[in-house]
Protein backbone atom coordinates (compact mmCIF):
# COMPACT_ATOMS: atom_id res chain seq x y z
CA UNK A 1 0.00 0.00 0.00
CA UNK A 2 2.82 2.38 0.86
CA UNK A 3 5.03 1.57 -2.12
CA UNK A 4 2.54 0.79 -4.89
CA UNK A 5 -0.31 3.05 -3.84
CA UNK A 6 -2.90 0.29 -3.50
CA UNK A 7 -5.93 1.81 -1.80
CA UNK A 8 -8.07 -1.26 -1.20
CA UNK A 9 -7.18 -3.32 1.88
CA UNK A 10 -8.48 -6.58 0.42
CA UNK A 11 -6.58 -6.12 -2.84
CA UNK A 12 -3.39 -5.37 -0.91
CA UNK A 13 -3.80 -8.47 1.25
CA UNK A 14 -4.44 -10.70 -1.77
CA UNK A 15 -1.40 -9.28 -3.54
CA UNK A 16 0.71 -10.00 -0.45
CA UNK A 17 -0.58 -13.59 -0.39
CA UNK A 18 0.40 -14.00 -4.02
CA UNK A 19 3.88 -12.53 -3.51
CA UNK A 20 4.46 -14.79 -0.52
CA UNK A 21 3.12 -17.82 -2.45
CA UNK A 22 0.51 -18.48 0.22
CA UNK A 23 -2.97 -19.95 -0.26
CA UNK A 24 -6.08 -17.80 -0.24
CA UNK A 25 -7.26 -19.67 2.86
CA UNK A 26 -4.31 -18.33 4.86
CA UNK A 27 -5.42 -16.13 7.76
CA UNK A 28 -5.19 -12.50 6.75
CA UNK A 29 -4.55 -9.59 9.09
CA UNK A 30 -7.41 -7.28 10.01
CA UNK A 31 -7.60 -3.93 8.23
CA UNK A 32 -6.67 -2.17 11.46
CA UNK A 33 -3.48 -4.27 11.63
CA UNK A 34 -2.62 -3.43 8.02
CA UNK A 35 -3.22 0.26 8.74
CA UNK A 36 -0.96 0.09 11.81
CA UNK A 37 1.77 -1.57 9.71
CA UNK A 38 1.34 1.11 7.03
CA UNK A 39 1.81 3.84 9.65
CA UNK A 40 4.92 2.11 10.98
CA UNK A 41 6.36 1.74 7.47
CA UNK A 42 5.76 5.43 6.79
CA UNK A 43 7.38 6.34 10.12
CA UNK A 44 10.45 4.25 9.35
CA UNK A 45 10.93 4.76 5.62
CA UNK A 46 9.00 7.87 4.61
CA UNK A 47 9.51 10.14 7.58
CA UNK A 48 11.10 12.79 5.34
CA UNK A 49 8.44 12.91 2.61
CA UNK A 50 5.12 11.60 3.96
CA UNK A 51 4.35 14.32 6.55
CA UNK A 52 4.84 17.09 3.96
CA UNK A 53 2.74 15.17 1.41
CA UNK A 54 0.00 14.76 4.01
CA UNK A 55 -0.09 18.48 4.78
CA UNK A 56 -0.18 19.32 1.05
CA UNK A 57 -3.02 16.84 0.48
CA UNK A 58 -4.96 18.26 3.43
CA UNK A 59 -4.53 21.79 2.03
CA UNK A 60 -5.84 20.61 -1.35
CA UNK A 61 -8.70 18.81 0.39
CA UNK A 62 -9.60 22.05 2.14
CA UNK A 63 -9.90 23.82 -1.23
CA UNK A 64 -12.04 21.00 -2.61
CA UNK A 65 -14.29 21.09 0.44
CA UNK A 66 -14.62 24.88 0.21
CA UNK A 67 -15.78 24.39 -3.39
CA UNK A 68 -18.46 21.97 -2.13
CA UNK A 69 -19.43 24.08 0.91
CA UNK A 70 -23.13 24.13 -0.03
CA UNK A 71 -23.13 20.30 0.11
CA UNK A 72 -21.79 20.06 3.72
CA UNK A 73 -18.62 18.17 2.70
CA UNK A 74 -16.80 15.74 4.96
CA UNK A 75 -13.23 14.55 4.49
CA UNK A 76 -12.69 10.78 4.81
CA UNK A 77 -10.00 8.23 4.08
CA UNK A 78 -6.20 8.30 4.27
CA UNK A 79 -5.94 12.10 4.17
CA UNK A 80 -7.99 12.34 7.34
CA UNK A 81 -6.46 9.21 8.90
CA UNK A 82 -2.94 10.54 8.35
CA UNK A 83 -1.62 7.80 6.05
CA UNK A 84 -1.90 9.73 2.79
CA UNK A 85 1.07 10.29 0.53
CA UNK A 86 1.60 12.22 -2.69
CA UNK A 87 -0.35 9.64 -4.71
CA UNK A 88 -3.45 9.61 -2.50
CA UNK A 89 -6.82 10.59 -3.89
CA UNK A 90 -8.81 13.22 -2.00
CA UNK A 91 -11.91 11.45 -0.72
CA UNK A 92 -14.85 13.51 0.44
CA UNK A 93 -18.50 12.89 1.11
CA UNK A 94 -21.07 15.43 -0.03
CA UNK A 95 -24.75 15.46 0.79
CA UNK A 96 -27.68 16.00 -1.54
CA UNK A 97 -30.98 14.21 -2.01
CA UNK A 98 -30.55 14.87 -5.74
CA UNK A 99 -27.16 13.41 -6.80
CA UNK A 100 -27.41 15.08 -10.21
CA UNK A 101 -27.23 18.45 -8.45
CA UNK A 102 -23.58 17.74 -7.57
CA UNK A 103 -22.78 16.77 -11.15
CA UNK A 104 -24.53 19.90 -12.51
CA UNK A 105 -22.72 22.04 -9.93
CA UNK A 106 -19.36 20.90 -11.31
CA UNK A 107 -20.44 21.09 -14.94
CA UNK A 108 -21.59 24.71 -14.39
CA UNK A 109 -17.99 25.40 -13.35
CA UNK A 110 -16.74 23.62 -16.48
CA UNK A 111 -15.11 20.85 -14.47
CA UNK A 112 -15.27 17.54 -16.37
CA UNK A 113 -16.58 14.71 -14.23
CA UNK A 114 -16.63 10.94 -14.33
CA UNK A 115 -19.69 9.41 -12.72
CA UNK A 116 -19.30 6.02 -11.07
CA UNK A 117 -20.89 4.11 -8.26
CA UNK A 118 -19.45 3.03 -4.92
CA UNK A 119 -20.81 0.37 -2.62
CA UNK A 120 -20.82 1.49 1.01
CA UNK A 121 -21.90 -0.25 4.17
CA UNK A 122 -24.67 1.49 6.09
CA UNK A 123 -24.82 -0.91 9.03
CA UNK A 124 -23.83 -4.52 9.67
CA UNK A 125 -26.36 -5.89 7.19
CA UNK A 126 -27.19 -3.04 4.78
CA UNK A 127 -25.23 -1.82 1.78
CA UNK A 128 -25.92 1.12 -0.53
CA UNK A 129 -24.75 1.85 -4.06
CA UNK A 130 -24.04 5.58 -4.00
CA UNK A 131 -22.98 7.91 -6.84
CA UNK A 132 -19.30 8.79 -6.92
CA UNK A 133 -18.19 11.89 -8.80
CA UNK A 134 -14.56 11.76 -9.89
CA UNK A 135 -12.72 14.80 -11.21
CA UNK A 136 -9.42 16.67 -11.18
CA UNK A 137 -8.87 20.13 -9.76
CA UNK A 138 -5.48 21.86 -9.58
CA UNK A 139 -3.83 18.58 -10.55
CA UNK A 140 -5.43 16.63 -7.70
CA UNK A 141 -7.67 13.58 -8.13
CA UNK A 142 -10.85 14.05 -6.13
CA UNK A 143 -13.62 11.57 -5.45
CA UNK A 144 -16.85 12.95 -4.02
CA UNK A 145 -19.27 10.32 -2.73
CA UNK A 146 -22.80 11.72 -2.96
CA UNK A 147 -24.97 10.63 -0.04
CA UNK A 148 -28.55 11.50 0.90
CA UNK A 149 -28.93 14.30 3.45
CA UNK A 150 -29.88 11.78 6.18
CA UNK A 151 -26.31 10.48 6.09
CA UNK A 152 -24.98 13.80 7.30
CA UNK A 153 -26.00 12.70 10.79
CA UNK A 154 -25.00 9.02 10.47
CA UNK A 155 -21.71 8.06 8.85
CA UNK A 156 -21.41 4.84 6.84
CA UNK A 157 -19.42 1.97 8.33
CA UNK A 158 -15.66 2.38 7.98
CA UNK A 159 -13.20 -0.11 6.50
CA UNK A 160 -11.25 -0.69 9.75
CA UNK A 161 -14.02 -1.97 11.98
CA UNK A 162 -17.79 -2.13 12.30
CA UNK A 163 -17.98 1.47 13.53
CA UNK A 164 -19.07 4.62 11.72
CA UNK A 165 -16.20 5.97 9.63
CA UNK A 166 -14.24 8.96 10.78
CA UNK A 167 -15.18 12.16 8.98
CA UNK A 168 -14.05 15.75 9.25
CA UNK A 169 -15.96 18.93 8.47
CA UNK A 170 -14.34 22.06 7.08
CA UNK A 171 -13.89 23.37 10.62
CA UNK A 172 -12.14 20.20 11.79
CA UNK A 173 -9.90 20.10 8.72
CA UNK A 174 -8.88 23.73 9.24
CA UNK A 175 -7.96 22.86 12.85
CA UNK A 176 -5.87 19.88 11.61
CA UNK A 177 -3.99 22.18 9.24
CA UNK A 178 -3.43 24.79 11.96
CA UNK A 179 -2.18 22.14 14.44
CA UNK A 180 -0.67 19.23 12.46
Image (cartoon, grey):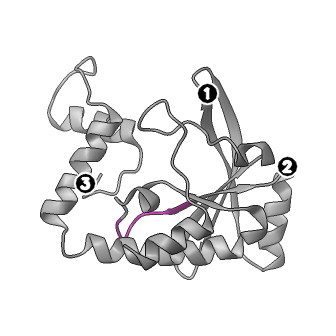
Determine the residue positioned at 52% across, 69% down. Answer: 173
**Residue where numbered disc 2 is placed:** 97
Residue 53 relative to residue 71: left or right: left
Secondary structure category for the residue under label 3: helix
Q: Position of residue 132 (x, y in %)?
A: 67, 52
Determine the residue positioned at 59% across, 73% down. Answer: 136
Secondary structure category for the residue under label 1: strand
| Closer to us: 73 or 29 | 73
**Residue where numbered disc 1 is placed:** 123
Magenta-highlighted residues: 85-91
Residue 45 relative to residue 95: left or right: left
**Residue where numbered disc 3 is placed:** 39
Secondary structure category for the residue under label 2: loop
Instruction: State how far apart marks 1 and 2 are (Cα).
Output: 20 Å
Determine the residue positioned at 70% across, 66% down. Answer: 113
Instruction: State how far apart marks 3 and 2 are (Cα).
Output: 36 Å
Badge 2, how many Cα within 10 Å: few under 14, some, many 20+?
A: few
Tally the numbered discs: 3
Amino acid sequence: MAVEGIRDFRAAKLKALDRLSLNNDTALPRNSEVNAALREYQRLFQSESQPASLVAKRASALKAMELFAKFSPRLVGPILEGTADSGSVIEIQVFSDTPEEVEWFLEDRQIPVEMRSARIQINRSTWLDAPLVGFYAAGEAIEALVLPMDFLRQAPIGSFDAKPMKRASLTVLRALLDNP
